[in-house]
Amino acid sequence: MAGRLPVVPRPEADERLSSWLTRLAGLYAMPVDALLGHLGVGGTTVHDLEWRLPEGEGASIARGTGISPEELQAMTFGNIVPDARMMIAQRNRYRCPLCLSDTREAGVRRKAAAFPWTWRCPIHGASYVTSTGAELESLLGNERLAALDRHAEHGAARLSAWVRGEDDGDERVPAVPAMLDLLTARHRKPSPPSLSEQPRMSLQERRDNHAFLTRPIVRQALTVVVPEYDLVAPVLTKPVRAGLSSLATASLLQAYALAVGIGRLAEDPVDPVVAVLLASDAAGEGRVRTVLRKWPLTSRRCVYARFWRAQRSERDREAALKAARGPQSHKLRFSQSHYFRYAVS
Ligand SMILES: [Zn+2]
């Protein structure tokens, strides 16, 4: 067993074990695997160690570095529920422009930055920037972002509690995985980009982009619960993966929209779901109903009662209009069927 390393930098606040070990290896100009071998924990990877740090390995690293086993444990994701492991990115998901120019921060990766619902740097408060240079302000617009932030923060808080095993839902609000199943449910059959989703094009451009204009796009409940996302998301990257994978693989904009959706569903687990059912087609309604089987009974009963009432009043309204005006044109019937769109507060 090798002795204690002569120089060991202190871990930064909320720093990940893999980040600190990589920095330490850099200081001694050796690959991180070689450092692990030197510390007596060879044959494993930094990512496995920071997921679950066994007591023996923790003690070996503590002996070689002088950092206590408790402090090392706190740098791991040891308190994260297994279902959430796929949410943890190996590198920072986005970058903070201020961390980049701060030499002290160079190479430091924090635990919070591994999760898709951290969109501002915990140290500088600056908005994270994606690899294409976009941040939430430019993707959503300042005004829309300010209106959505409350729901997004609520959603992020629920997600953070869920990954630590501290939030499994209650008698009204379902657990996070059930909310993600609802948000990613395909409530309508795939359809090509609508006129409002298409960029302005000349006739020639329309001919050249026939494949894009006729490509069926997956339609998910997320766009009903968070219509602001539906408005700004590029049509080809509007769909997200199903269930928990949606967040694990989400872009910055997608992750933000999913957190807003979770926030809204946690605040009101009934009305947004009724709106989804009203916007669904027959097959989509079946898929949404399947997802709702995992929802608390109290909320599910309220959803179906309000859905039934809304359908009945729509039928009554249609019948009254029909009686008053005689046979209707196709166009009018279509606009009435969209009467019960979910109103955004
Ligand atoms: Zn920063």
Image (cartoon, rainbow, N blue to C red):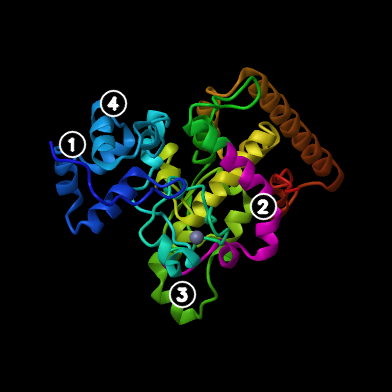
| Residue type, label 4 | Glu
Q: Earlier in the sequence, mark 4 or mark 1?
A: 1
Residue 78 falls in image quadrant: top left
Q: Residues within 10 Å of mark 1 (few under 14, many from 20)?
A: many
Which residue is denoted by mark 3 in the rendering? 206
In space, the residues marked 4 and 1 are separated at their CA atoms by 11 Å
The residue tagged 1 is 41
Residue bearing the label numbered 2:
148
Nearer the N terminus, badge 4 or badge 3? 4
Is residue 318 at least partly visible in the picture?
yes
Identify which residue, 208 or 23, lies in the foreground.
Answer: 23
Decide: marks 4, 1 in contact (CB < 8 A)?
no
Question: Which badge, 3 or 2, is on the more N-terminal residue?
Answer: 2
- The residue that mark 4 highlights is 55
In space, the residues marked 4 and 3 are separated at their CA atoms by 63 Å
Q: Depth-wise, is mark 4 or mark 2 nearer the camera?
A: 4
Asked if labels 2 and 3 touch by Cβ distance under 8 angstroms, the answer is: no
What residue is rendered at 45% in x and 63% in y? 130
Could you say where residue 337 lies in the image, as x and y percent from the top left?
69, 45
Q: Earlier in the sequence, mark 4 or mark 2?
A: 4
Disc 1 residue lies near ligand 1 with CB under 8 A: no
Q: Position of residue 61 (x, y in %)?
A: 25, 37
Instruction: Indicate the amino acid at tag 2.
Output: Leu
The answer to whether the residue labelled 1 contacts the one labelled 2, judged by CB atoms less than 8 Å apart, is no
Secondary structure beneath dot 1 equals: loop
Decide if residue 6 is on the left or right side of residue 135: left
Q: Kindly report the secondary structure that dominates the magenta region of the rendered protein.
A: helix
Percent coordinates x, y for residue 326 in the rendering: 81, 46
Q: Is residue 308 magenta?
A: no
Residue segment shown in magenta? 131-157
Three-letter code, disc 1: Val
Q: Residues within 10 Å of mark 4 (few under 14, many from 20)?
A: few
